[in-house]
Image (spheres, grey):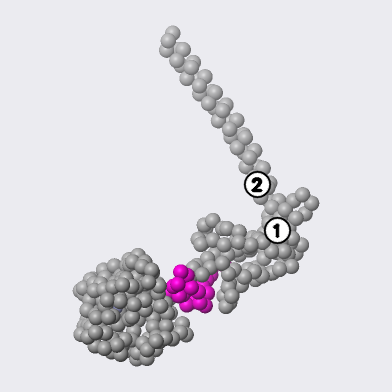
Amino acid sequence: MRHIKIKTLIVTIFTLGAIILMSGTTSFSNDLFTANCGEVSAETSETSLTKPLLTAKLTKTGLKLSWTKVENADEYKIYRSNKKNGKYKKIAEVTSDTLSFSDKDYKGERKTYYYRIKSVTKFGKGINHIYSNTIKKTVYKRKSKVHGVTYINGILIANKTYKLPKTYNPGTNSKAYKAFKKMQSAAYKDGLNLFIASGYRSYSYQKYLYNSYKARDGKEKADTYSARAGHSEHQTGLAFDINDPSSSFDNTKEAKWLAKNCTKYGFIIRYQKSKEKITGYKYESWHIRYLGKSLAKKVTKSGKCLEEYLGITSKYKQR
Ligand SMILES: [Zn+2]
């Protein structure tokens, strides 16, 4: 008797479950049907209007976005994101007559952004939205100053012309350090040992260093190889002296390897042999500056030193 009861119960549960499942399926397929209908109607109305074609150009004042007109559009909304598939934030709304917008809302370091726009067309109680293509752009200003730190074309600059504030003490840049570690492993595989002899240096430590060189060699000579406080690239946390910061490093296997390979890891040999008058420093085979892979490649390929590449000087205001 007991056995039969359990069996009946199982059958009942099974049947109920099946009914629930079936009703679930029914409502699900209804949803699907509605969704399909919606999609189809949206597609039909979209194809009757052309997608706005977005283009972008970096100008002196900002990134100029321009697009093609969408017929009967009431307005355009401009969106920006720092990841292609990330969250897009609306940065502006313009009327339908305006087919361009300048994004000036960035300063300091170079940034890569993704842009797209949306046309908005109102008809009766409905609204039609059409998104443009997405554009990837690296944006920067010709010159900007953030908390006293100068950026030229979005690149942090410390040289004889551009001084860093006393209070700027970022420590070693983590991206630069990671890049160095990668480079170090690669060199190790080639049987060479690279290490950082001197990395980040604070304003006050640089002051101490420069003053001791000045006391030893005199101001004029010290200025050819040591930076005055606030003018050292080491204070940026983006520069490293490798192995042996002296001319005896020049002809070593390590120096040759560094000159040949550092660009691949995002570094440049900052003070080159024939560029003394432009950089303001004598040749330093051991001093590397982190710029990131793509920029380091561009600068190295140009054959120019960073000052030439950016069209800037490196000269003290006071002799
Ligand atoms: Zn150095």
Task: Indicate whether residue 81 is drawn in magenta.
Answer: no
Q: Is residue 144 above or below residue 4?
A: below
Q: How many marks?
A: 2
Residue 213, x across and y down, in percent: 25, 83
Task: Indicate whether residue 141 is drawn in magenta.
Answer: yes
Residue placed under numbered mark 1 in the picture: 120
Residue at (56%, 28%) from the top-left corner?
20
Q: Is mark 1 within 8 Å of ligand 1?
A: no
Residue 58, x across and y down, in percent: 57, 75
Residue flagged by tag 2: what amino acid is it?
Asn
Residue placed under numbered mark 2 in the picture: 36
Residue 288, x across and y down, in percent: 32, 77
Residue 272 horizontal side relative to residue 139, left or right: left
Residue 135, x across and y down, in percent: 57, 67
Residue positioned most to the top: 1
Looking at the picture, tell me which residue is in the foreground, 267 or 34.
267
Residue 298 quadrant: bottom left
Residue at (24%, 81%) from the top-left corner?
212
> Which span is picked out in magenta?
135-156
Real-space Cα separation, disc 2 to disc 1, in angstroms: 23 Å
- Which element type, helix, strand or loop, lies under badge 2? helix
